[in-house]
Amino acid sequence: MTADVETASGIAEAGVLATVTVGPNPAADMLTIALGQAAGRRVEYTLTDATGRALRTGVLTSDRTVLGTEGLVNGTYHLTLCSAELLKSIAVQVVR
């Protein structure tokens, strides 16, 4: 019996969320999300802390959105973006 086996060494990032940019990183006062090719599509976001607790959620409605970092302590957070096609998570640091 023979079997075809392919080894995956990584996951290719594809689709409209591949063009999303987030910065500055690290952030002090604000974080800018630019949707790139995902502009005009429904993209939901969730910002979570290291324990997985959702701190901010919403829907990105323009090609460029600014999120304030007020109330966030220094540390690493995860910004998760979700469209109909894909899910993308970006590590973001807040440093004041």
Image (spheres, rainbow, N blue to C red):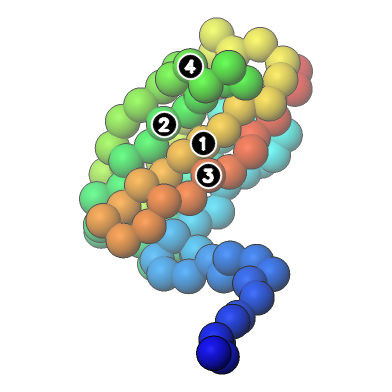
Quadrant placement of the C terminus: top right
Residue 60 in the image: x percent, y percent? 32, 42
Residue 29 appears anywhere in the view: no
Do the numbered discs 3 and 2 sit on residues whose CB atoms are within 8 Å?
A: no
Q: Earlier in the sequence, mark 3 or mark 1?
A: 1
Q: Are marks 3 and 4 in contact (CB under 8 Å)?
A: no
Where is residue 74 shown, x and y percent of the image? 72, 16
Question: Which amino acid, by three-letter code, is at mark 3?
Answer: Ser
Question: Do the residues bearing badges 3 and 1 touch, measured as CB atoms within 8 Å?
Answer: yes
Q: Which residue is mark 3?
A: 89
Position above or below: 59 against 34: above
* Labelled pair 2, 1 in contact (Cβ < 8 Å): yes
Cα gap from disc 3 to disc 2, whole angstroms: 9 Å
Task: Answer whether labels 2 and 4 touch (C-beta < 8 Å).
Answer: no
Residue, disc 2: 46
Q: Residue at x 48, y 50 (%)?
A: 88
Residue annotated with mark 4? 53
